């Protein structure tokens, strides 16, 4: 760890001053290296994570694109905007810039072995911002991490900048990394428990550093009566697609679905769920956590099982088919964190309401903070949409209207963050996706010149 | 505390949606109330703080202006910019806005009874951002705080919005306020010790909140040989003005002055210091802290006393005349935190160097983070300035060239923050002065609409 940080700190001396063209060129070279090694990387990741090759190929392509997007932002100047206020007789000329913080520690995620790992969004925005990076590899895919790192090092060696990206493994290494005095900012994607523990380490340093953690998220979805009346079957099919995508191991997976009590959509959901094949969970420890969380929810007396699904162990892996449970809206608010904490895996809870207003009240009581929240309403029911959006905006960083929250589009209007517990620090720059993500790796510096006329 | 937060939380339901014109009008009404009560407020503050009436009248005027500036930013739309990305066949329309966090807790400072107190910069930017505010009064000026609060309440009652600003007193009340689940962000200006303790409370909540603390700052000033050669006498006079302004009880007071060894500027500084009358320190506990810190620095064997000054107690107050000490640059780096921690009061330390390069090296070793850092160089010595600025930008949030850091100009290019320990959270929005200060009170929310064509 000490050697990795020393290398990254030495590389920062050059990289922080690298002109935009140079930074963009290096980011593009990293993207190109991923494309060159595409087949090998996807194959390794399939073996280590149990995710499908199509999904992983798409994710690797997106990771290349994210590096290209960061390069474009740097090249266009959009990533390096200064504010200049000219002086006059009574005030000095002042120039405010955002400068890179130094070495960034990036704790990789288990569920996106490319997009939130060695050269994923946190790394690409840190490098674009002028920071150098030490990645703490996720234990779920060490060989994929090493292979990605080897690709990146090949590109960086050609650019004569091998030090700007370093890789370490292991929990203790991660803690030591976070405590290292030359590490100036940290990013993390993972569980609430892990993220809170690391945030405390960052806050307890002699000189604390910003810790941007993206933690668990319940992603509630409200389905208004008008929506089921219009498109019950389609919503049921989409819901099952969404909660079983990548084995339900996605941070934007809906964990709560509010529907009218006794509506036929529940039977339609059960039918679609029954047709989904089993999925291998990411790694054994995660599988065991899923098993325990699923059982604790199903064990609540107020919860009834709609589709039981199963969790089985085989050859050291844990496999699961979807589980759907249901609860009355009044019981749901009483159950508290027992059901509003994320269940990471292919499970979701249907909350039945009599009156849509009860659903709006309940979601506020149940959900403290979430990355996303969604509402489906009747095509012409603008009033219901507006009322729901007003409530959901208080709980989430992104509110989706008549759609599902899974896709995190890479636009300047994206925000991938939300109130606690979904992120550790709910400030405007606390997004891991989008151009604003660069802001996490910078601080403001003003240059104040002499008052003219003095 | 609970009643104050409940009132502010109820008021937030309205205020968060108040249109720009309404928010601006209320901010202007608060400014007007301060102007109406000018004489009474200044008189109370003179009695409680020992600061001069000219200084306090200027500060009160500036506080009115800050409210007007916030009103202008709101009115112009500059405070409420959205990012809109239109959808196309493959991506939805997305609108990203910054929305207010909720109730803000504002811990007032002791040294600016108006500008960083009840309706100071933290309150005006919180209100402008759409938050409501509970101020924890500083114990050094409770009557000034109450009178300011009464002025504000008169204006707010007329606007039918009395709940948007509340006031509480006492250390325990402050802790309870910071732990209250309905408080969503906190600002603080004060000591490193107090700020770190409160930051830990904010981080330890079940749902942590951002805590923006502006803490101690050493504000190093480098004087290059060319500067003393050109304007030794003027620099000495300005330095004493600056470090004795308001009894040296200002967050941007220079605590370290680097000068060529044995230069006559030291004798000139001593002469000016001897002519400064005694100043009453803000409140007795602060006076005792100053006495202890001053003695610990003077007690170091490597430190020699240039102007001893004195610290005396009278009628329950502590009075002080300026103290100037000196140290060799090599000893200074060895002394560590014993001399690089802020001494709050009319004391500063002259660091003597042989070679300006040694001063540049030493300042990096001695100063971890500071609100400001300054360099004075010869009029034509651009190379020295650039080299120094490059070093100082790594240590400070604002670098002043050929000037003093005291005045914090209210421009869009201002940043009043810096690396730890000068602020708790060195992120781009962590400024208490300037338009960017509003960013502390907001979070991002995206509204994602249906993919067109679906």
Image (spheres, coloured by chain):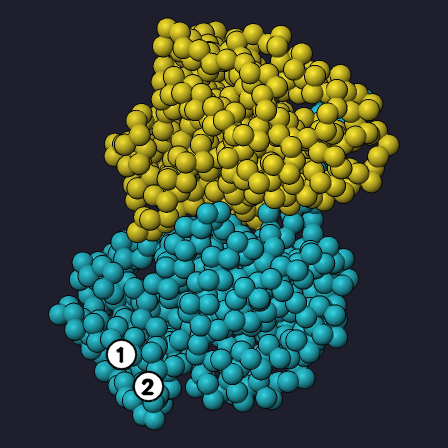
Chain colours: A cyan, B yellow
Q: Is B161 on the left-hand or right-hand side of A179?
A: left
Residue B294, percent across and down? 49, 24
Q: What's the CA distance linking mark 2 and mark 1?
A: 9 Å
How many numbered circles does the render carry? 2
Residue B77 appears in the rendering:
no
Extreme residue in the right direction = B380
Q: Secondary structure at mark 2?
A: strand
B226 or A254, which is in the foreground? Answer: B226
Picture residue at 57% right of the left edge, 67% below the top: A4
> Is the residue under label 1 in contact with that under label 2 (CB below 8 Å)?
yes
Q: Quadrant of residue B73?
A: top right
The residue under label 1 is A291
Residue B396 spot, x, y in % from top left? 61, 40
Q: Which residue is mark 2?
A: A318
Above or below, A418 relative to A122: above
* Residue at image location 66% in from the left, 75% down from the top: A153
Q: Indicate left or right for B242 with B149 as reference.
A: right
Front residue (pair A245, B434): B434
Viewport quadrant of the C terminus of chain A: top right
User: Is A216 left, or right, of A165 in this rendering?
Assistant: left
């Amino acid at each position: 760890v000490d050697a990795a940080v020393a290398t990254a700190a030495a590389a920062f001396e050059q990289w922080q001053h690298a002109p935009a063209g140079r930074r963009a060129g290096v980011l593009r070279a990293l993207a190109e290296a991923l494309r060159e090694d595409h087949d090998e990387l996807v194959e390794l990741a399939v073996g280590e994570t149990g995710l499908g090759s199509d999904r992983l190929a798409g994710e690797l392509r997106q990771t290349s694109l994210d590096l290209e997007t960061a390069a474009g932002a740097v090249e266009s100047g959009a990533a390096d905007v200064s504010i200049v206020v000219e002086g006059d007789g009574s005030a000095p000329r002042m120039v405010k810039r955002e400068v890179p913080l130094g070495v960034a520690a990036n704790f990789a995620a288990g569920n996106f072995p490319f997009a939130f790992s060695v050269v994923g969004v946190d790394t690409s925005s840190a490098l674009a911002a002028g920071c150098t990076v030490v990645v703490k590899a996720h234990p779920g895919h060490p060989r994929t991490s090493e292979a990605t790192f080897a690709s990146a090092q090949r590109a960086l060696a050609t650019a004569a900048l091998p030090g700007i990206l370093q890789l370490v493994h292991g929990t203790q290494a991660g803690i030591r990394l976070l405590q290292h005095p030359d590490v100036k900012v940290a990013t993390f994607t993972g569980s609430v428990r892990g993220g809170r523990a690391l945030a405390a380490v960052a806050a307890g340093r002699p000189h604390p550093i910003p810790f941007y953690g993206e933690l668990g998220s319940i992603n509630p979805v409200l389905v208004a009566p008008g929506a089921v009346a219009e498109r019950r079957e389609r919503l049921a099919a989409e819901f099952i697609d969404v909660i079983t995508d990548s084995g339900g191991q996605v941070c934007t997976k809906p964990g709560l679905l509010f529907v009218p009590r006794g509506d036929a959509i529940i039977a339609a959901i059960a039918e679609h769920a029954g047709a989904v094949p089993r999925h291998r969970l990411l790694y054994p420890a995660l599988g065991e956590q899923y098993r325990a969380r699923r059982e604790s929810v199903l064990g609540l007396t107020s919860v009834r099982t709609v589709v039981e699904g199963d969790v089985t162990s085989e050859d050291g892996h844990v496999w699961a088919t979807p589980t759907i449970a249901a609860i009355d809206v009044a019981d749901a608010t009483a159950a508290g964190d027992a059901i509003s904490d994320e269940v990471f895996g292919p499970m979701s809870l249907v909350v039945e309401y009599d009156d849509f207003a009860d659903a709006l009240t309940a979601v506020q009581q149940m959900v403290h903070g979430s990355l996303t929240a969604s509402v489906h309403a009747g095509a012409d029911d603008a009033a219901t949409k507006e009322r729901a959006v007003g409530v959901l905006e208080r709980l989430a960083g992104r509110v989706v209207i008549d759609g599902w929250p899974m896709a995190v589009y890479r636009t300047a209007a994206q925000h991938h963050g939300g109130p606690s517990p979904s992120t550790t620090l709910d400030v405007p720059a606390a997004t891991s996706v989008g151009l604003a993500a660069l802001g996490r790796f910078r601080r403001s510096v003003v240059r104040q010149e002499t008052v003219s006329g003095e």
